[in-house]
Image (tube, rainbow, N blue to C red):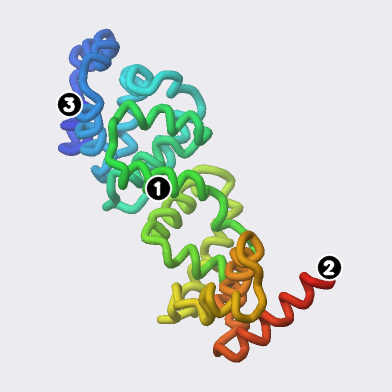
Amino acid sequence: RAVRFSTQLGFEIERATFAAICSNAAAIKKISGERIAMELEGILAAPNRSSGASMLIESGLAEQIFEDFAGEKARLAVGVLGHLPERIDFALGLAALFSGFEMAFVVEKLRVLRLSRKCTKHVKYLLNNRGRLLKDRMRLAELKQFLAEPYFEDLYSLEKAIQKVGDGDGLAVLKALRRRIEDLGDVELRPRPLLDGHSLARLGAASGPQLGQLAEEMYIAQLEGELETVEEAERWVRKWLKRHRES
C-alpha cells in the first residue's frame, strides 16, 4: 500500500520505512490475490507507474508476488511502463509489466491475481500479439482484422513503448502503420461475408475442412478489396474450387 500511495501521490518513502518494506516483503504472500490486484492496479494505472514498478522490484515485493520476476526482464518492464500514454487501464499496465517475459510464465503468474476473464483475455491478447504490428507491409485484410479488435490501440501503445525501450528500429514501421490507418478513413472493418456457408455449399464446396478454408480465404479476399459484389465472390469461389479439384 505504501508503494501505491507513493506512486499515486508522488511522495518519497522514508528510508527506514522502505527498509522495513524490504525486510518484510515475504509477508505479502499472506495477502489475497484479489487484494494484491487492487493495489497493483492503483500503481500501474497511475501516471508515475514506472516509479512504482521500480519500487516493487527494488523492495523485493514483485518477486514475492510473482516468483522469478527479476533481472533484466523485470528492469525492462520499468522502461516500457514509462513510455505508455499517461492514462491507461490495468490490463495494458500488466501487459507492460510482463512485456519481457514468455507467455507461459505470464499465464502462470496472472493466476496469482485472480483476475476477471475479461482482464485476463485482454492481457493475453496484448502479449500474444507482441511484434505482429512490425511487419514492414502488413496485408490490408490483416490490418482490418487488427483494427476490428477492441484492444488494438492498447496493442499499438504497448508495441511503441517496447520499441522506445529497445533499439527503436520498429518505430518507423509503427509510424507508417498509423498513417496507413488514417488513410483508410471510415472503411468498414468487419463487413458481412458476401457469401455464407449455404451459398458456398450450393456452389460445390464440400462440408468440413474445405468449406472452412474456402470461407476464410474468400473473406480475406473481400477484406483486401478484391471482392465487392456477390457475383464477384461467386466467380472467385468457382475458380477456387476448380483449382483445388485439379490439385
Q: Amino acid at mark 1?
A: His
First in sequence, mark 3 or 1: give its number. 3
**Is residue 134 visible in the rendered structure shown here?**
yes
Q: Is residue 135 left or right of residue 182?
A: right
Q: Is residue 140 left or right of residue 239?
A: left
Mark 1, other Cα within 10 Å: few <14 / some 14–19 / many ≥20: some
Residue that appears at 41% across and 81% down = 186
Q: Amino acid at mark 2?
A: Ser
Residue 247 numbered mark, or none: 2
- State which mark lies toward you, 2 or 3: 2
- In the picture of the structure, the residue carrying the numbered disc 1 is 83
For the point 44% across and 73% down, the residue is 190
Judged from the image, the secondary structure of the residue bearing numbered disc 2 is: loop
Distance, label 3 to label 1, CA atoms, is 24 Å
Type of amino acid under label 3 = Arg
What is the distance, in whole Å, between disc 2 and disc 1 at their CAs?
Answer: 51 Å
